[in-house]
Image (cartoon, grey):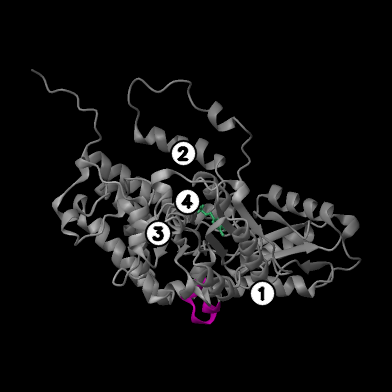
Amino acid sequence: MGEEKSYHMTPEEFRRCGKELIDWIADYHQWIEWLPVMSRAKPGQVRASLPNSAPEEGESFEAMLVDVEKIVVPGITHWQSPNFFAYFPSNNSFPSILGDLLSSGLGVQGMLWATSPACTEIETQVLDWLVEMLALPEKFKSTRAGGGVIQDTASSSSLCALLAGRERATEFGSNERGCDGRLTAYTSSQAHSSIEKAAKIAGIGRANLRLIETDEQFAMRPHALSAAIEGDRRQGRVPCFVCATIGTTSSNAIDPLRQIGEICRKEGIWLHVDAAMSGTAALCPELRWIHDGVELADSYCFNPHKWMFTNFDCDCFYVADRAALIQTLSVLPEYLRNKATESGAVTDYRDWHIPLGRRFRALKLWFVIRHYGVHGLRHHVQRHVTMAQQFAAWVKADANFELAAPVPLNLVCFRHRAGDSVNQAILDRVNQSGEMFLTHTRLGDRLTLRLCVGQTKTELRHVERAWRQIREAVPARNQPAASGG
Ligand code: PLP
C-alpha cells in the first residue's frame, strides 16, 4: 500500500511558515503607523472578496498570507497604531504576542488543576504578583481567603461578581429556587453597559438595576446611592450588588470608592469595582489614589488587555472571599471528578467563571511582566498619562476649545466651543483623513470628543500631530482669524 496523504502541515512547513508570519507581524508593527487607522471597508466588502464556498483542496500558506494583505489589512481598524486614540486602548506587545502563540502551541485546556497544573499555578502566582504591583489589598491574594483569576473580559467579571453578590444576599438560595424579583443592584448612570447586561443575564432584571445619579464630575453620588438602597429596603426589596467604576468609559470618572464602600459595608451589600482600563494606573505609586477605599470591596477587576500591553483577552478578576464565588458557580459532574480536586489542595478555575474550558492565558501576562518588569510597565503608563496631560494643557490654553471633564489619567474629553455640529465636523474630518482615530461621547448632553492615550507605540510626536490635525479640522467659518499656539 502506498503512503496515505496526511493533509497535515509538516513540522518543517510549520517552521518555515511560522517564521514568515513572525516576520510579517514584525513588519506590520513597523509600518502600521502609516496605514489609515480606521478601516475604510464598506459593509459587505470583505465578505464579497471571499469565495462562496470553502476550498475542496487545501491551499498554500503563501496564498493565505497574500489574502491577509489584500483582504484583512484593509478590512481592519489598526488598534495597534500609535495614532489610535479612540474608545479605550486594547494594546499589545511582542512578548504578549509570543505568549499567546505559545499558548496556542501548547494547546492546553486548563479547566481543572489536574488538566495542566502549570496553567493554573502560573496564573495564581502572576495574579498574586499583580496584587503587589498595583498595591491592592492583601485579601485579594490566593494566600489569604481570596484570589485572582483571568477572565476573558471585564463584562464576564462583573457578571460573576453580580452572581456571587446575588447568592450571598439570598444565602445561596437563588441558585436553587431562582430569583424572586425582589433583588436590586446599583451602579452609576455612567457605568459601563456591561453592568446592565449582567443584570439581564443574572435574572435581576434591568428594571431592578438602579442607575445612580452622578455629580458634576460624572462620579457616583454616594448620598443618592444610600437613598436608593433605603428606598428599596422600605419596599421589601433585597439590595445585593453595587458596582463602582474607577475610570468610566465615557469620561474616566472615578467613583468615590471609600464612601461607596462604607455604605456597602453598613448594608452588607457586595461591592464590585470595575477598573477596566484605569486600574493599570496603580502601577504608579503617585496614581494609586484612584483606589482609595478598595479594601472595602468584595471584588475587583482590571484589564491588562486594555492598557497593560497584553493581547486581548485578559481581564484580572479578584475576590476577597473565593469560597463565595466558588459556591456560586461550582457544579461538579461525575466526569470531572479527580483526586487532586477531592484533596482540596488545588484550585480548579472552572469554578471561578462562566465557561468550563480555558486557555493558558497566563502565559502572555507572565511574559509581559517578565519582559518589561514593573519598572518598564510603570515607565510606559507614566508616559501615557504625561502625554494626555500635555494634550489637556493645549486644549485649556486654546480659547476655542474647552475641557469637558476632569482629566485624572490618560483620557481627555474636550470640545470646540462652537457646539455639536462643529465637533461632529472635526470628528468626521480627522477620522476620514485616516491619520488618526478619535471617538466621541455625550457629556451634559453635548457632543464631546475623546482622546485616549494608551497605545504601546504612541509618542509625544503622535499626540502633537493629533492636536494640530484637530485644530486644522475646524471648519473654516469657525477658525480664529489668526490661530496661535
Ligand atoms: N468596564 C469599563 C469601565 C469599560 O470601559 C469597558 C470597556 O471599555 C468595559 C467594562 C468592558 O470591557 P470588556 O470588553 O473587557 O468587557
The residue carrying pointer 1 sits among few (fewer than 14), some (14 to 19) or many (20 or more) residues within 10 Å by Cα, namely some
- Locate residue 399: give its quadrant: bottom right
Ligand 1, image quadrant it occupies = bottom right
Q: Earlier in the sequence, mark 2 or mark 1?
A: 2
Disc 1 marks a residue whose amino acid type is: Gln
- Residue 415's tag is none
Quadrant for the N terminus, please.
top left
Disc 4 marks a residue whose amino acid type is: Tyr
- Assign a secondary structure to mark 4: helix
Q: Nearer the viewer, residue 204 or 34?
A: 204
Locate residue 69, reporting x and y percent.
49, 40
Quadrant for the C terminus, please.
bottom right
Q: Earlier in the sequence, mark 2 or mark 4?
A: 4
Q: Most extreme residue toward the left, as rendered? A: 1
- In the drawing, does residue 300 fall left or right of residue 138? right
- Locate residue 8: give its quadrant: top left
Locate residue 68, reporting x and y percent.
46, 38
In the rendered image, which residue does mark 1 sit on? Answer: 390
Residue 259 versus residue 186 in the image, above or below: below
Disc 2 marks a residue whose amino acid type is: Val
The residue carrying pointer 3 sits among few (fewer than 14), some (14 to 19) or many (20 or more) residues within 10 Å by Cα, namely some
In the rendered image, which residue does mark 2 sit on? Answer: 68
Q: Is 395 part of what is drawn in magenta?
A: no
Which stretch is magenta?
Answer: 281-289
In the rendered image, which residue does mark 4 sit on? Answer: 28
> Which numbered mark, 1 or 4, is in the foreground of this view?
1
Disc 3 marks a residue whose amino acid type is: Phe
Q: Most extreme residue toward the top, as rendered? A: 1
